[in-house]
Image (cartoon, rainbow, N blue to C red):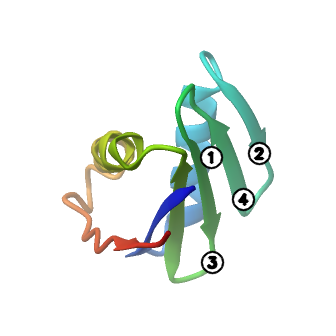
Amino acid sequence: MTTATARIPTASGAKYLQQLCKHWGHKFDVDLSEQKGIVRFPAAVATMEADAHALLVTIEAQEKEAVERMKGVVASHLDRFAFREAPLPFEWSNGV
């Protein structure tokens, strides 16, 4: 399993994860609460957790290529919803 995690500084993390999960919920399996969302894409799972200062995004997949692709998908969608703050700073750290 390959993972990548980014902590994106924003006071609107909970709002953005709600918007993203509702957007993707039309196509994919989504679990959503106030501060956490999980989106199950065909080749990866994205988990988002918000606190008062940031949105933590973790992407997990079997293939490294799927993680790399989904990093771009998540970042571009988040920047669209966070247009007033975009581009948001994404500093991904890769796990194993």
Amino acid carrying label 1: it is Gln
Q: Is residue 89 above or below residue 63?
A: below
The percent position of residue 44, horizontal first and vertical second, equals 54, 40
Amino acid carrying label 4: it is Lys
Q: Is residue 64 above or below residue 40?
A: below
Looking at the rendered image, the disc whose residue lies closer to the viewer, 2 or 1, is: 2
Which residue occupies 61% across, 38% down? 21
First reached walking from the N terminus: tag 3 or tag 4: 4
Q: CA separation, marks 2 and 3?
A: 15 Å
Q: CA separation, marks 2 and 1?
A: 7 Å
Give whichever of 29, 83 is nearer the camera: 29
Q: CA separation, marks 3 and 4?
A: 9 Å
Q: Residue furthest toward the top?
A: 27
Q: Is there a contact, CB below 8 Å, between mark 1 and mark 4? A: no
First reached walking from the N terminus: tag 3 or tag 1: 1
The residue singled out by tag 1 in the image is 18
Which residue occupies 80% across, 52% down? 33
Looking at the rendered image, the disc whose residue lies closer to the viewer, 1 or 4, is: 4
The residue singled out by tag 4 in the image is 36
The residue singled out by tag 2 in the image is 32
Label 1, residues with CA under 10 Å away: few <14, some 14-19, many ≥20 = some
The residue singled out by tag 3 in the image is 51
SS type, badge 1: helix
Q: CA separation, marks 2 and 4?
A: 6 Å
The percent position of residue 88, horizontal first and vertical second, equals 26, 64
Q: Is there a contact, CB below 8 Å, between mark 2 and mark 4? A: yes
Q: CA separation, marks 3 and 1?
A: 13 Å
Amino acid carrying label 2: it is Leu
Q: Is there a contact, CB below 8 Å, between mark 3 and mark 1? A: no
